[in-house]
Amino acid sequence: MMDKSPAPGGWSHEVARDPRRVHWMELFFDLVFVAFVGQLAHGIHGDPGWAEFGTFVLLFFPAWWAWVNIASVVNLLPRLSSRALGVAMLAAMASAGVMAAAAPGAFGERAWAFSLANAALRLVLLALWLRQHRETPAGTAWRIWTYNGGTAALWLVAAFLPLHIAVILWAAAIAVEVVMAVLGGRLWPDRGVAGINIEHAAERLGLFVIIVLGESVFTIVLEVSDDWGAGAGGAGGLGFLIVAFLGWAFFQYGTGTMAAGLERLQSRSDFTGILVTTLFLPFLLVVGVTAIAGAIATAIPEPFEPLPIGSGISLGGGIALFYACNAMVALRYGQTPRSVLPWALPTIVIAVLLIPLGVQVPALAMLALAVLLLVLVTAYVEAKRRRRVGSPLGGGDRIR
């Protein structure tokens, strides 16, 4: 039954959402972050080097960290009304939209806008975390004021300083937030773990990955439409299969264990484990997917030429990163090395070996080899699942 009692703080007089499910406004908010990823992804098309990869990661992490903070505080505010959530998401979307627009020049003439947008986003977070503190007071509010208020001030000041100094303040702001989150999990694990809604957390992450994979498909379609031809079509088809197998791996195997794994970590008050599996490792997974999409986009216009070494790293390294992250999450959720390593290690090793091969064979052949690798690992996992389901023990550990 829907609770229509007044919500504390005076934001609304009715609760019109199910806190166990992701609200539509949260998905609407996610679209801006996918646009942000798309903006940054253009920088790792072609033949990216360490500078381009580094720029992508350094600009993406502040946005990712803001996203996981938004997701976390909404998760911990079950009585936040649909109307109040909508207002907060729209305010956050406006800030994230400026971040996305400024991202291509964030290390140049648009650095001030990138800084101001980050400051504004953290003020939205400050308001939400203070509301969460009023609803479930535990300790003092100084950590919240430092966590988002202090870092908002750093981002604000950085907007008016030269770039070489501003970047230092950006790094300091992110470091403060990460360190405080990790220390909070270690020093006060019960405070962070007790209120987490596992259903919402699992669904939130899964839906974000769907949107990122969808952006990869959009990139493939756009490239094929620009380079219409048999070779481009073949490369686009193989690229689609790669993204499809990644989606299959995540949603057929990963999401099935996510809720159970998070519940296991919550029951042990393992807040650090929850942080690692929902905040840090998914970031690397999304980086891997984005890198793969960049390599596919590079292959489509010139399918019969070898990939540049940077795109070879994106393709092989992205696949290795995707499966390594899934393996680490599965192990942290309590699955045995015996059930994880047989599919994880060969996939990671072969994916890495594809990197030097990429400069020797046509891009079309590289994509075909990547598809073959994913077919083999998927077939292995499917066969193992079928054997487990058919065993007298009734399934055993599910495979991520």
Image: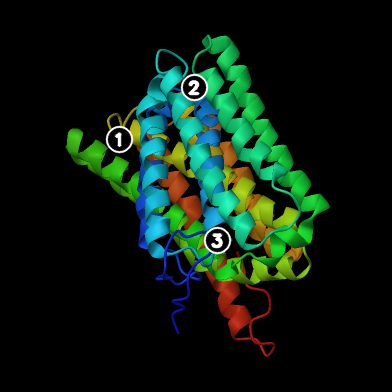
Q: What's the distance in space between the residues labelled 1 and 2, CA to CA?
A: 20 Å
Residue occupying the point 65% across, 66% down: 195
Q: Which residue is mark 1?
A: 300
167 to the left or right of 345: left
Looking at the rendered structure, the kind of residue marked 3 is Asn
Identify the residue under disc 3. Answer: 75
Quadrant of residue 270 in the image?
A: bottom right
Residue receiving disc 2: 52
Q: Secondary structure at mark 1?
A: loop
In this rendering, position of residue 89 left or right of residue 260: left
> What crowding class fits label 3: few (fewer than 14 Cα within 10 Å), some (14-19), or many (20 or more)?
many
Q: Please, which residue is most extreme toward the right here?
A: 187
Q: Nearer the viewer, residue 298 or 91?
A: 91
Quarter location, residue 16: bottom left
Vertical order, 130 against 122 (above or below) = below
Q: CA distance from mark 1 to mark 3?
A: 40 Å
The secondary structure type at the circle numbered 3 is: helix
